[in-house]
Image: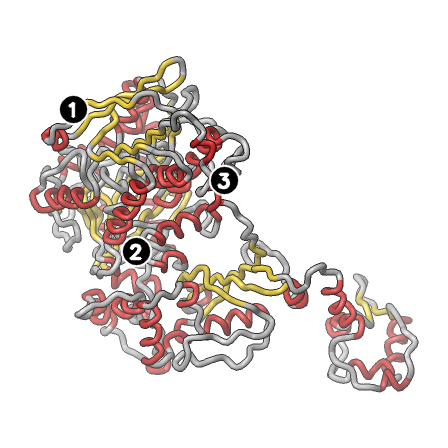
Amino acid sequence: MISLCIIVFLCRHASFVEPFQSVPTWSPNLIYKYRGQYSYNREKSFFLSSVRKTSIEQTQKPRSRRSRSSRRRSSSLTKDLKHPDAVETWRIYGVDVDPDSLGCSSKKTRSNEKDKAHQDVSPERLYMTTPVLTSLLTRLRIKPNHLVDDSKDDQVELPPELIDTRVIRRSTDARRRKGSDPKYTYVVDVDITKGNARALKFVHQPGRMERVNFESDLKKRNEVDADGLDNRATLPKVLIIGAGPAGLFCALSLASSGFKPIVLERGQPVEARGKSIGALIHRRSIDPESNFSFGEGGAGTWSDGKLTTRIGRNSEPVRYVLETLVNYGAPKRILVEGAPHLGTDNLVRLLRNMREDLKLKGGEIHFGCRASKFDIQDGVITSVEAENSDEKVNANAEKNVSFNQLDAVVLATGHSARDVYQELHASGVTLEAKGFAVGFRIEHPQRIINEIQYGKEWGRRVFVSNESEQLGQKFTHRMSTDDANAQHFGKYDTDDKTAHSGNLPVPSYRLATNEAFDGESNRGAYSFCMCPGKLKCQIVPSSTEEGELCINGMSFSNRDSLWANSACVVTVSPDDPILDKYQSTHGQLAGLEFQRDMERKAWTLGGGNFTAPVQRLTDFVAGRVSSSVPSSSYRLGVKSAACHDIYPKPLYNALVNAITQHFEKQMPGFLTHEALIHGVETRTSSPLRVVRDPKSLEALGVHNLYPAGEGAGFAGGIVSAAVDGLAVAEVIKAKFLGEGKSSSQGTPFSVGFDY
């Protein structure tokens, strides 16, 4: 009652009413808003917090909404800064843009964007358009100035508070929560002075707004002064086994620091490897040493070339890997796209450039040379024996060759090099079983995925040709994907009021659950390596010998396809009961033998000759053989078969439960008779890990042997394998360059990727 009387008394005096002339009514929230004059306590009573002696003239003057105390706080924000004009960079997440705002531009605008793509313009600038800047300013609560029309000018005008802006990543958010439409989501770096950042109340919030520190020496570490090497009587002899991402990045990093690494690759360079793959596709003749799995660049070369990773998309080592790929010829857009990929055609070109650069820096690379034996004495690896391919022997090369007096051996073979695991096991190198996943590859018509992900209104706005033209790719005909999409959505009535002008990229998907019930317990199940139809994706055989059938997805960078495919797999733990019968005879190699057994079953069901067994997804769930099957992108032929009988019953039950109870709920329409499963996908990851010391990265109990990459069990894709190869190179340089020659001593910037 007393507090209420005080409020009534104050309201009758103009000196106190004046600051609140714009407030129509009194409420606790409004009074709390002007907390410079009043406060609101927990008991919901009001009291006068401070009454300053002011003259009638001052109180009767019109005052702004900001109180004097708030202005004093604002001015004090920059007084305590030592260097308020110093520039710092902030990374802003969640800058959302409506596709219609990007699609409303005129034809001249799209022409300008296409011209930018052909010019030497960084993607950070290419994607910074007026709608993006408008959304950014709204996010930062900055009143926009007059923005330049994109159709008339290539530049975007910045407000005085900002110095520069750059798009770091662009992705598509197709999650339809509460009926929301798809949208583009950007991550933008903003250069701003410390004073303005403080005035705009920039606060470090991980995942929303982060202050970026670019004081990194990662690039310097890969350009270390090699005086320490020059002073040695002989250079350290480093042998790298495998020319995949881990091996190549390790070799290039060492060569940049003065080392002369020797790289052994059992397969062929990309030029000859393409011929081997052509022989498999057209004549069904497989070369066990040069195929979709073995050869320059590793298994990822003739795959989708995905650059997604779970070790930090914006982390320093990942950005370094992406920038290095761009320097060797990869498209610049991979630096910005949320789900970047290279495609086989781009990988072939940049791998050739990486090889030539390695040779110029003094490195060696031997193709058609397979490591066959490791000489380990007293816990130290000293030499490696290798076998040359028949082609090299026919060219007057010796069949067997030895590499002796080695100072370091980097083991960077892929997960398909099963003979290497067996040789390591026989040599006493410590191996441990790790979890992996097996399943099938599911193929949908791309038009169905478009409707599931974007809905009927937005699904019709998927245009492969327009998107490709904006990226600088030229086509002389309309995409078949676009024709199929237009025909599919033509059956729906179009309301002009709901018609959209913006275009959307060809959608992909990612599904996962940890509650796939196998009849006794839950397992993990997920989609893997999804290839959307814009890339002329197809299913290919990734087998390394006859009698075994394993498949994978492959795509080029700039062509379309009517299909979208993805692996659908279920997890197998190291102590899984389904491995019991294999462990009794194969011990730690039980996972390898299980994979082989499933691949032999698939070969038999398909009838041999690399024909793939297939089954409609609805029939797979029902446990019946399909009476007919739709067309497939697998070019070596398909055969309707009982794919539900390939895997043990617990794995089949888990897959069915995941598809019917989880994936179908996450993506209604995923379970359709038009979807076709192909058998089998078994090589998602290595079932073994070469145990290594977490600091020295040497194999446990074997000095100078450095396991690296996906085959060793420390990576899960191109980027993470490359990062792990760089980590191994760092510890080798620290070991031989000595103190003061490398800044990577102690814990390296990455210790690999773990499943």
Q: Specify few, some or many for label 3: CA neighbours under 10 Å numbering under 14, 14-19, or 20 or more.
A: some
Q: Specify whether residue 709 is in view.
A: yes
**Residue 670, label in figure:** 2
Residue ID for mark 3: 749
Please report whichever mark, 2 or 3, sits nearer to the chain's N-terminal start: 2
Q: Is residue 662 visible?
A: no
Compute the Cα span from label 2 to label 3.
40 Å
Q: Quadrant of residue 356?
A: top left
Residue that protrudes farthest toward the left in the picture: 283
Q: As rendered, which of 523 and 120 lies closer to the eye?
A: 120
**In this rendering, is residue 728 above or below 164?**
above
Dot 2 or dot 1: first in sequence order is 1
Query: Which is closer to the viewer, label 3 or label 1?
Result: 1
Q: Quadrant of residue 466?
A: bottom left
Neighbour class for label 1 at 10 Å: few (<14), some, many (≥20)? some
Q: Which x, y percent locates residue 89? A: 56, 59
Badge number at residue 399: 1
Image quarter where the C terminus lies is top left
Q: How many angstroms separate mark 3 from mark 1 (CA)? A: 40 Å
The foreground one among 314 and 623 is 314
Pointers 2 and 1 in contact (CB under 8 A)?
no
Instruction: Classify mark 3: helix, strand or loop.
Output: loop
Residue 370, compared with residue 643, is above or below; it is above
* Quarter of the view holding residue 487: bottom left
* Picture layout, residue 35 above or below residue 511: below
Q: What kind of element bears circle 1? A: loop
Looking at the picture, which amino acid does disc 2 mark? Phe
- Front residue of 53 and 672: 53
Label 2, label 1: how far apart the Cα atoms are: 52 Å
